[in-house]
Image: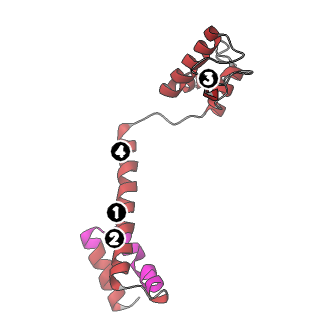
């Protein structure tokens, strides 16, 4: 490690610029090889630092929020919750509306091949699942 590199690394530690400290040498070499200007090199360094800080900030906020572990539909145990229709939930998760039912057909809200009551129930379930994903995962244990 050259004196310059060591000095830059120390300055980055002092200023708490971890991403710049970790990437300045490789980005400098890349800038030299691609004949980038000093300003373009500086922009790349600063962009890397901003992106790293944003990522760490999100990670810290999520950690501080103490949110429950994210669960997926595949992890849900339908055996322990027999009142929840597994096939229907999976079809809704995939955007399905039942046999012959497609509300996106453009027929002003009426669904060909589906009774309006049946469509209303499926639409309600789709909206409910989208707005309350924890309702699908809470029973998964």
Q: Are marks 1 and 2 in contact (CB under 8 Å)?
A: yes
Residue 117 is drawn in which quadrant?
A: top right
CA separation in Å, label 1 and label 2: 6 Å
Q: Pick the quarter of the image with the C terminus.
A: top right
Q: Which mark is residue 114?
A: none
Q: Which mark is residue 107?
A: 3
For label 1, the SS is: helix
Give the residues in magenta: 13-31
Q: Are marks 3 and 4 in contact (CB under 8 Å)?
A: no
**43 in the magenta segment:** no
CA separation in Å, label 2 and label 4: 22 Å
Q: Are marks 4 and 1 in contact (CB under 8 Å)?
A: no
- Which residue is situated farthest in the bottom direction here? 2
Q: How many marks?
A: 4
Residue behind mark 2:
46
Q: Which mark is residue 50?
A: 1
For label 4, the SS is: helix
Q: Is residue 114 left or right of residue 24?
A: right
Q: Earlier in the sequence, mark 2 or mark 4?
A: 2
Q: Nearer the viewer, mark 3 or mark 1?
A: 3
Q: 51 or 122, which lies in front?
A: 122
- On screen, residue 83 above or below 77: above
Q: Residue at x 48, y 26 (%)?
A: 131
Residue behind mark 4:
61
Q: How did the renderer colour the structure?
A: secondary structure
- Which residue is situated farthest in the left direction here? 15
């Amino acid at each position: 490690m050259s004196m310059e590199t060591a000095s830059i690394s120390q300055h980055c530690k002092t200023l708490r610029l971890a991403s710049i400290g970790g990437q300045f040498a490789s980005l400098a070499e890349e800038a030299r090889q691609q004949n980038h200007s000093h300003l373009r090199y500086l922009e790349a360094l600063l962009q890397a630092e901003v992106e790293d800080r944003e990522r760490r900030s999100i990670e810290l906020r999520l950690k501080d929020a103490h949110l429950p572990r994210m669960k997926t539909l595949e992890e849900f145990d339908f055996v322990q919750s027999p009142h929840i229709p597994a096939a229907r939930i999976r079809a809704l998760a995939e955007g399905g509306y039942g046999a012959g039912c497609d509300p996106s057909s453009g027929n002003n809200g009426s669904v060909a091949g589906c009774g309006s009551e049946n469509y209303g129930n499926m639409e309600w379930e789709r909206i409910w699942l989208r707005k309350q994903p924890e309702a699908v995962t809470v029973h998964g244990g």
